C-alpha cells in the first residue's frame, strides 16, 4: 500500500511539473537557443534579434549557442538529446527538412524528436556573386558565362544538404550548367569567403546577403521567389530574369526537445507572438527580406511535415549526393 501511495504521489508531482502554474513561473533561469550553424549566418540573422527581444520580455537571458557541422545536423542532434525541461530550444531550418532524406544514419528524427513551436521567418533564396570575380550583371549573362565555361566556377553553401546546396543543384539542372559545390560550416563562413573573393557565387538566403548587397560588396542577380521582395524592389525574380521555375525559399523555426512540458511550449508560443509584433523585430525582418509569420504549434508541425516530403522529392529528382 505504501508503494502504491508513493507511486501515486510521484505521478501527481510529475503532472504538477507540467501544469499551467509552471508556465507562470517559467523561466527561472537562463534559456539556451541551439543554433546549428556558425555565427554570422542566416539563422543568426533572425535568432539573435529574437533572443534579444525575448530577453526583455522574459526577464531572463536567452543565450545563443552555435553548434555547427554536417549541414546543421550536429546541432540538431545535440538539441534533440537535451533535457526537455523548457530551458533548451532549437532554431531549426529548411536545411533539416532536407537532411531527413539526405542523411540515412541520423541519430534523431526531425519530426518525432522535436516539438514544433513557431515559424520564425521565411526569406527567399537569392543568387549573389562577388562583382570582382563575376562580371555578369544579370542572371542571363551569368548563365551564358557558365555555359561558355563549364566547370570553371565554384559555388559556396552553408553545408552539404542545406537549402544553399539544393538551390545550387536545382539551378544547375534548370540551366544545364556545370558549377562545382564547395560546402562550408554555415552560411556565415561561406559569405565571408564570397565577399573575400575565394568563392565567386552563393545561392544564399536573403537574410544573410541583404547587408553585403546593400553595401555594394556583393551583387544580387535574382531572387528565387514568385514575386519581388519589398526590401529589394529593383531585384527581379528568377522568372523575370529568364529562369522560370527557379523558386527556392528557406525558413527558420523554433523547436523544443520532445517531452518539453506543453504548458511551457504554450507560454513560449505566446511570448513569440508578442515578440514578433514589436517594431524592432518587424524592422529587422524587413531588412532581412522576410515577412513576419504567425504559424505556430500544430499548424507549424504540419508545415514541417510538408517540407520534409517536398524536399525528399527534390533530392530524388535531382539525384543529390552528399559531398
Image (tube, rainbow, N blue to C red):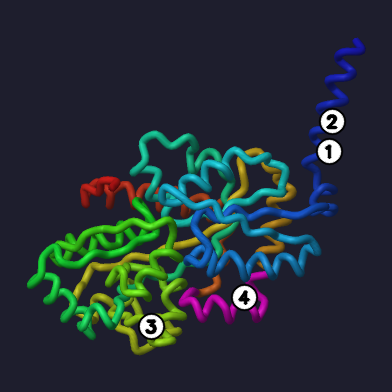
Between the C-alphas of marks 1 and 2, the distance is 6 Å
Q: Residues within 10 Å of mark 2 (few under 14, many from 20)?
A: few
Q: Is residue 159 above or below residue 58?
A: above
Contact between marks 1 and 2 (CB within 8 A): the answer is: yes
Residue 211 part of the magenta segment: no
Between the C-alphas of marks 3 and 1, the distance is 55 Å
User: For this view, does 274 lie left or right of residue 290?
Assistant: right
In percent of the image, x 18 and y 77: which residue is there?
142
Between the C-alphas of marks 2 and 4, the distance is 40 Å
User: For this view, does 316 lie left or right of residue 307?
Assistant: left
Query: Which of the labelled discs sits on residue 12, or is there none?
Result: 2
Query: What span is colored magenta in the figure?
Result: 275-290
Contact between marks 2 and 4 (CB within 8 A): the answer is: no
Q: What is the quadrant of the N terminus in the image?
A: top right
Q: Is residue 30 above or below residue 190?
A: above
Query: Which of the labelled discs sits on residue 217, or is there none?
Result: 3
Provide the secondary structure element on which disc 4 rests.
helix
Between the C-alphas of marks 1 and 4, the distance is 34 Å
Residue under pointer 1:
16
In percent of the image, x 68 and y 41: which residue is there?
84
Query: Which of the labelled discs sits on residue 281, or is there none?
Result: 4
Amino acid at each position: 500500500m505504501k508503494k502504491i501511495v508513493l507511486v501515486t504521489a510521484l505521478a501527481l508531482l510529475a503532472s504538477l511539473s507540467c501544469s499551467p502554474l509552471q508556465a507562470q513561473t517559467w523561466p527561472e533561469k537562463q534559456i539556451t537557443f541551439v543554433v546549428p550553424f556558425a555565427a554570422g549566418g542566416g539563422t543568426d540573422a533572425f535568432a539573435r534579434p529574437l533572443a534579444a527581444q525575448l530577453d526583455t520580455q522574459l526577464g531572463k537571458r536567452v543565450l545563443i549557442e552555435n553548434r555547427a557541422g554536417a549541414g546543421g545536423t550536429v546541432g540538431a542532434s545535440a538539441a534533440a538529446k537535451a533535457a526537455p525541461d523548457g530551458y533548451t530550444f532549437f532554431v531549426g531550418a529548411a536545411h533539416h527538412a532536407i537532411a531527413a532524406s539526405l542523411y540515412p544514419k541520423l541519430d534523431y528524427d526531425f519530426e518525432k524528436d522535436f516539438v514544433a513551436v513557431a515559424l520564425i521567418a521565411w526569406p527567399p533564396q537569392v543568387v549573389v556573386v562577388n562583382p570582382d570575380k563575376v562580371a555578369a550583371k544579370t542572371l542571363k549573362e551569368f548563365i551564358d558565362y557558365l555555359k561558355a565555361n563549364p566547370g570553371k566556377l565554384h559555388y559556396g553553401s552553408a553545408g552539404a544538404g542545406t537549402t544553399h546546396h539544393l538551390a545550387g543543384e536545382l539551378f544547375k539542372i534548370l540551366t544545364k550548367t556545370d558549377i562545382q559545390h564547395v560546402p562550408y560550416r554555415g552560411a556565415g563562413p561561406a559569405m565571408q569567403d564570397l565577399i573575400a573573393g575565394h568563392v565567386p557565387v552563393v545561392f544564399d538566403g536573403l537574410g544573410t546577403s541583404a547587408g553585403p548587397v546593400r553595401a555594394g560588396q556583393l551583387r544580387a542577380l535574382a531572387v528565387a521567389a514568385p514575386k519581388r521582395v519589398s526590401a529589394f524592389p529593383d531585384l527581379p525574380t528568377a522568372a523575370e530574369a529568364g529562369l522560370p521555375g527557379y523558386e527556392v525559399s528557406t525558413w527558420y523555426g523554433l523547436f523544443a526537445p520532445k517531452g518539453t512540458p506543453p504548458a511551457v511550449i504554450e507560454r513560449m508560443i505566446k511570448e513569440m507572438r508578442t515578440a514578433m509584433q514589436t517594431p524592432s523585430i518587424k524592422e529587422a525582418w524587413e531588412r532581412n527580406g522576410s515577412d513576419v509569420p504567425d504559424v505556430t504549434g500544430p499548424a507549424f508541425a504540419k508545415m514541417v511535415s510538408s517540407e520534409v516530403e517536398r524536399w525528399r522529392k527534390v533530392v530524388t529528382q535531382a539525384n543529390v549526393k552528399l559531398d
